[in-house]
Amino acid sequence: MPKKAKPTENGKEEGSVPCKQVKIEAAGKPSSTLNFESPSDLFGSLISPIKTETFFREFWEKKPLLIQRDDPAVATYYRSLFRLSDLKSLCSRGMYYGRDINVCRCVNGKKKVLNKDGKVHFLQLRKDFDQKRATIQFHQPQRFKDELWRIQEKLECYFGSLVGSNVYITPAGSQGLPPHYDDVEVFILQLEGEKHWRLYRPTVPLAREYSAEAEDRIGRPAHEFTLKPGDLLYFPRGTIHQADTPPGLAHSTHVTISTYQNNSWGDFLLDTVSGLVFDTAKEDVAFRAGIPRQLLLVEATAVAARRLSGFLRTLADRLEGTRELLSADMKKDFVTNRLPPYHMGDGSELSTPGGQLPRLDSTVRLQFKDHMVLTVGLDQERSDETQEKMIYIYHSLKNRRETHMMGNEDTESHGLRFPLSYMDALKQIWGHLPISVKDLNLPTDEEKENLVLSLWTECLIQVV
């Protein structure tokens, strides 16, 4: 384990710091594991004792963080999230190579995939693990493991971004993947055994895609350490890394929890600029003027580039005074594909409205606020020139946990649409306090009752 650098007289450090290290030892008092009271409490407990403000100021998208915990209670909790022994029962539920499980090994700096065809049989899987020293990669275990569902659902609320996970189980003296970098922010929880990690400086900071890297191109590790059960490691997207299980020890199991894929300012700009252009073109005739003849048949000219630059300046000026940004896809895609709220039992409270039917004299309160978004978009049911803005409310209450992060093309969105004139009333409901239906800012009592009844039918409000 590398030593921490020592501060010099001028306050700077001598030598290279391998990684920000925080070592925590159990001190005889009861140890907390994770706090599920709120999304922020959950994240704070996950990276404890580092303060959340410190994490985002010093580490997020900047540099790795290693938290080593000599705490049996945390190690026991981590081990409960996923074990090698869980694979037998999971395979009996119908797992398939490629979709649910990959079997691979790093051979001469290359990833060698050892998948069979079709359904995974546990005995064959265990044979490849024991005899071929292969790594077992289990995709998106939150589909089956309740505690990971509980963790990742809260993290999706906290980040406002999809949160996926993969479990890696590697036998002693073996390595599953070659050096590579990812397009996601990574939190690694060591569950069983030990894993030896080497991190390298990024060649593409905050990378937007996955890429393997040849070992002769990445130089010496910037950070090197071994994770033990209960330890946590964070590193930003683009960080080159590789990991192996030390020889002579038991197998290693860790879960990689990842987020912020395609969630950059560039992605947000692409998502919102189309709506901004649509609005501006309605009011500015210059945006509606035709492009020069044959422009699409030749390379763009300097004249065209200057015109586009002028349009972009116009859009920038308009953006300064815009209150409502039109989101084309990002908000809807996030809510449509995220996990449903964690619940015990059959989840009927998420699909069947309960309690009193709301009426004009009722007081109502929003529920599951972390699981819905309110956004303004163009009327998706019309495509003609009279297309108007509408309010869309998307929610994840009816999402299917079993398909989370599995790339399903036919994922159905759930929600409601309202005229733009309902915005003030919806913002009243979106406030933190209960509100009387008759006080909603709508012109008629019928509209007030119809609004709350629509929300109640989707289980988004309750009568208090």
Image: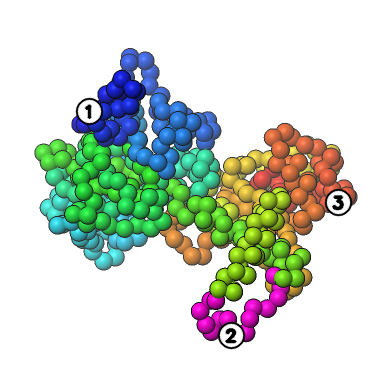
Element at label 3: helix
Estimate how packed mark 2 is, as few (under 14), some (14 to 19) or many (20 or more) residues with alpha carbons within 10 Å: few
Disc 1 versus disc 2: distance between alpha carbons? 65 Å
299 falls in the magenta region? yes
The prevailing secondary structure element of the residues shown in magenta is loop
330 falls in the magenta region? no
**Residues rendered magenta in the picture:** 287-301
Callout 3, which amino acid?
Glu
Looking at the rendered image, the disc whose residue lies closer to the viewer, 3 or 2, is 2
Mark 2 — residue? 294
354 vs 329: above or below: above
Please state if 437 lies on the left or on the right of 404 as rendered: right
What numbered label is drawn on residue 3?
1
367 vs 300: above or below: above
Identify the residue at horizontal 44%, vertical 47% (top origin). Answer: 259
Question: Residue 255 at x, y = what percent?
Answer: 33, 43
Callout 1, which amino acid?
Lys
As rendered, which of 7 and 389 lies closer to the eye? Answer: 7
Q: Quadrant of residue 347?
A: top right
Callout 2, which amino acid?
Gln
Please state if 444 lies on the left or on the right of 17 as rendered: right
Element at label 1: loop
Identify the residue at horizontal 64%, vertical 60% (top origin). Answer: 313
